[in-house]
Amino acid sequence: MARQVSDQSLRKLLWTFVVTGVATFMVAMDNLIVTNALPVIRVDLGTGLEGLEWTVNAYTLTFAVLLLTGAALGDRFGRRKIFAAGLVIFTAASALAALSPDIDTLIAARAVQGLGGAIITPLSLTLLADAVPPKRRGAAFGIWGAMSGLGVALGPVIGGAVVDSASWQWIFWINVPIGLILLPLVAAVRESRGGAGRLDPVGVVLATAGLFGVVFGLVRGGSQGWTSGPVLLGLIGGGVLVIAFVAWQARARYPMLPLPLFRSRGFSVSNAVGFVMAFGMFGAVFLGAQFLQTVQGYSPLEAGVRTLPWTAAPALVAPFSGALADRIGVRRVLALALAFQAAGVASLAAVSRPDVPYAELVPPFVLAGIGMGLFFAPMARAAIDFAPRGMEGVASGASNATRQLGTVLGIAVLGAVFSAVGGYASGQDFVDGMRVAEGVGAVVLAGAALLALAIPESRRTAPDTMVLAPEAQASTSSASTIV
């Protein structure tokens, strides 16, 4: 009987690994698959820079704002049940994206995809954590992280192969059979719940509307003029709503983002570093991914293979970053990582020209990739080390959401710089805009490297006395899933 119970537990554990790992791979892969298909989407749907920015940002903005809410929903109503709902949403949105006849429909579908991703990502790891004995969780989380890293590394190559052999629509269709296969397998995963899982709908609305307004103003500013009515309304109105969000979080009974976390200098500075890193790096990635196809004429597959030194390097370097942080300290590793990234983006801006040989692009790609690989594990550790005990989950989720918002604003701002200086009229026009935008990104990353040195020595220093209301602690107890 004991042997039978053990076999059943092992089967449940294996199925949990399969379901959560494949779902994580799918969501992670989807980000860079889309990035690699942007030049083809621009031509096929007759859009411009603004449409491409929203294709990326619609997903990232929704994902960032709803990340903690997705975790709270799982805590309250059952993680397996809500995870399955996230799979349904992501799969259906992928089909809608594939069927999109125009850029507006695609953007709407991407926003819904972001909702699904915001549910899948946190709950995949909490379901795995519940299925694995505590002493085995380190190895289990390592496998989970490897699936995410593999999705990021292979995304451009898989996306390029799909676009080359079929069409850009198939980068979304590919998610549909994966989702349909995973859905019945979710039944093999054990159900679990967290705390009360309190929700903050007012906070979600204020954050979403405010950030949408700011990003709208930044994206439209280049084409409509920075003093035009819609742009000013977006920037000013969005800014007011963001301020209202902060004020609401200070008084809400169940805040989406508990502000007392930021009383810790270490937590505040490390999150500022994460935000600035995402702003500079992923704003540069947005343009760099288009350069190889739009200017140099490579096919999507050829471009995907050529970016592997950038996208695959993190998977190779990341396993060593934690040990390095133990040896020399988190802040030094973060500063080193950001210095690598700044050097990579700066050198990419320096060598970029329409006819630049690929060999000259490899060193910048490698530098940026090494920097990214060194960054994420120490960043995740900093978020937890400076959080009050019992608040590690919400702290980790808040740290991830902050980086996602940095990505959104980085793409919007560096896109505005690009459109002000260059454009898509010619290869040289594109390079002129990209070099200035990536120069700005490099300066931002260099500033983040200096800021990282202001992080206190990473250790478990967050005082237990800095506690939040029990309701706030319960609101996002499963957000420790985010790395």
Image: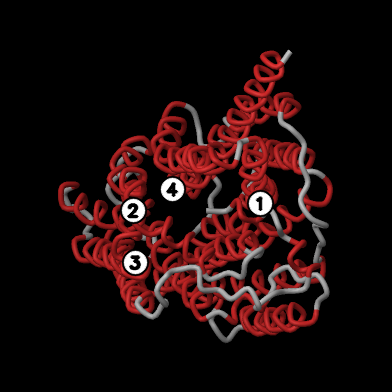
Q: Give the distance between the C-alpha atoms of the residues marked 2 and 1, in whole angstroms.
A: 30 Å
Residue indicated by mark 4? 39
Q: What is the distance, in whole Å, between disc 2 and disc 3 at their CAs?
A: 10 Å
The three-letter code of the residue at mark 2 reads Ala
Return the mark for residue 149. Answer: none
Foreground disc of the pair 2, 1:
2
**Neighbour tally class for label 4: few under 14, some 14-19, many 20 plus, Cα within 10 Å:** many
**Depth check, front residue: 42 or 269:** 269
| Amino acid at dot 3 | Gly
Q: Earlier in the sequence, mark 4 or mark 2?
A: 4
Alpha carbon of mark 1 to alpha carbon of mark 4: how far? 26 Å
Task: Identify the residue at horizontal 53%, vertical 77% (top origin).
Answer: 268
Q: Quadrant of residue 459?
A: bottom left
Task: State how far apart marks 3 and 1 are (Cα).
Answer: 31 Å
Q: Which mark is residue 118?
A: 1
Q: Position of residue 131 (x, y in %)?
A: 65, 35
Q: Is residue 286 left or right of residue 320?
A: right
Q: Position of residue 28 (x, y in %)?
A: 52, 44
Residue placed under numbered mark 3 in the picture: 329
**Dot placed on the residue nearer the N-terminal end, 2 or 3:** 2
